[in-house]
Amino acid sequence: MIYRIIQRTPNRFHLDLMQRRLSETEADVLYYTLIELPGIENVKVYQRTAQLAVRYVGVESAILDYISDMDLSDPALQDNVPTISARATNEMYKNKILNKVMLRIGKWLFLPLPIRTVVTIYQAVPFVWRGLKDLFNKNVSAEIIHAAAVLAALLTGEFDTAASVVFLTEIGDILEEWTYKKSVDDLAQSLSLNVEKVWKVADDGTVSQVSLNHMHNGDRFKVTMGNMIPLDGKVVSGEAMVNQAALTGEPLAVRKHDGVIVYAGTVLEEGELIVEVRSSSGETRYDKIVNMIENSENLAALTQMKAVSVADRLVPWTFGASLLAFVLTRNVMKAASVLMADFSCAVEVAMPIAVLSAMREAGKHDITVKGGKFLEAISEADTIVFDKTGTLTRATPVVQEIVTFDGQDPDEMLRIAACLEEQFPHSLANAVVRAAKERGLSHYDIKTKAEYIVAHGIASNIGEDRVVIGSYHFVFEDEGVTFENEADRARLGEIPAEYSHLYMAIGGKLVAVIAISDPIKENTPDVIRDLKAAGFKNIVMMTGDSEKTAKAIAAQAGITEYYSEVLPEDKAHYVEKIKDRGEKVIMIGDGINDSPALSAADVGIAIKEGADIAQEIADVTISGSDLNQLVNLRRLSDKLMKRMHSTYVIGNVLNGAILVFGISGLIVPRIGAVLHNASTIGLCLRNMQDLSASEEDAPETVSLPQPSVA
């Protein structure tokens, strides 16, 4: 592809592609291909002028060489484009409006009055019929009001008025639908354009991590315990238990084995699978996300549903006002003008857009929210419960000390522990494996496959001896491990309390304690303070760690209420107890063991760097690198509630004014239609704006760059 550099600044360039204009397909191929490249932060494609702007990190020459080699007609590149793109959607609605306008102008310029009248009646009949059908079905709607206005104009011979009302209402409907689709598309892009990775299995059995978009039908990928299945496919090797709750609602995991179909979005709870792709992501991923958004029962906030209910109840009052206007004035047009006041339209159209825009804005801060009702619950929440490891503390803990017993060698104990822990990814397990690699310890060949016991530890065998590693409760109480002497028991108390402890036993005897430092994230105390200022009455920490470790971390974080040595079901029971008191609860965690509590809470928030199953169950996901997102999320939720309330008030005031103007005779039906549609579209456009941009007290946050299509 030929290009000319128009402008170049550090980490940004602007190109002229040396064409008169780009087609929709070419523009989409260019955008969706480049945005997936490593190092590309932002892409803008200017279709009409055939220009391209790119913001990047890395080597500019490599990106320019790639653009130079691109062939926009290459089918492989066209696979990157979603079935329905934002650009195609915009063109579709532009053409709809243009066609309506051209038909309207053509009718006035070229059709004589009698034929024009017949055409008006022909166009009005389906419009009136929809209203009558809603009336017969006792479905109170705006269609009834508009149909009544058009019917009144037809019966009084005001055919031009009837034609204007039909035309303006149809244009308004198109603009409202376009605005809504644009909001859905913006949100879908923020969810779908994150580059996802998959472990691809080559023909020779080697495994490598590749972009999801590079997987095709017939390719194979590997999924391990706790991870999400990224694509639909057939199991070709392995056996596992798969949680399909997000897809089917089944509460229990389902066994999957050779020849069985698995589905994207489900989570592997136990075992390991190699899957052959049956449906590659480019064909269906974007459409599935759009369908999820549009069909989600979680999309509507309770406030929105209440407002819609109230607005619908105002429809009979609008008819009553219209009847009163006719009785007082004996003027059908004044009565029809009153019918242009539709109190439900602004609420039903503009409020969902406010919710979608808030969800999109959250996405700009690397926060994924799965529904408007969760934003409302966050605004109303009283209690927030934190898991400790990987949530309040760093995601990369470090082994600080290996305390051995019975004369064992520390390196040998670390080597055995690493070989067990490497089979089950967890922040503490990763620390053990990392420490072994840093010490250059060779792999220990354990013949028996290790067994993972959720929230407890790992068990396996070395020869005839059972080896276990995990929490104090698991090792000493569940497994009945003993000490050689009281001196060994006393040594446990000498290990610093701020460390997390992994206990390891072989043959029923304690052989080592691995002390792992898991310091809190630098901004954790500030975040806890800000959350209290934001209105949370109770901030709680729950962890499976020992009392000493929990107490030390809670003190550093500024949390006064904490619980140690808790099991997954304990966290869930605590959440249920708080909810039974009438409080709304937020639970934040990152591990498989946090899943029951995440599910039980009013809002479950998962750390994106944590287990896939936690992310799947959670209602919101945030980046663990910045806990300030929780404060931003609370503020964003509060502002959304204020915007929804103001939308309801402004919509009612504006339509109330239209009603008064109609009764007084200051406006005719066509002007009423213009004012009504203009007010609704104005509210929609207002609600599309970022909440932080529209408020003077917006929190100071760093917005992560997001892809945009010009």
Image (tube, helix red, strand yellow):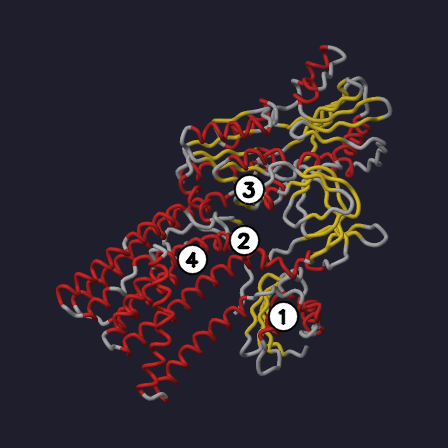
Which residue, given by chain and number where applicable, does mark 1 sit on?
Answer: 30
Task: State the residue position of label 2.
Answer: 292
Residue found 55% across the figure and 33% down from its top: 597
Q: Distance of mark 2 from mark 3, alpha carbons?
A: 15 Å
Residue denoted by label 4:
353
Q: Earlier in the sequence, mark 4 or mark 3?
A: 4
| Marks 4 and 3 close (CB-CB < 8 Å) | no
Residue at the (26%, 61%) spot, across then down: 654
Q: Nearer the viewer, residue 166 or 389?
A: 166
Residue 439 as seen in the image, left or right of residue 693: right
Q: Label 4: how many residues lie within 10 Å, few (<14), some (14-19) or many (20+)?
A: many
**Residue wearing tag 3:** 618
Q: Which callout, 2 or 3, points to the residue nearer the camera?
A: 2
Label 3 element class: loop
Under mark 4, the amino acid is: Ile
Dot 4 falls on a residue whose secondary structure is helix
Residue 570 in view in this figure: yes
Q: Could one spot residue 346 in this view of the protein? A: no
Q: Who comes first in sequence, dot 4 or dot 1?
A: 1
Chain-order first, disc 3 or disc 1 = 1
- Decide which of tag 1 and tag 2 comes sooner along the chain: 1
**Callout 1 secondary element:** helix
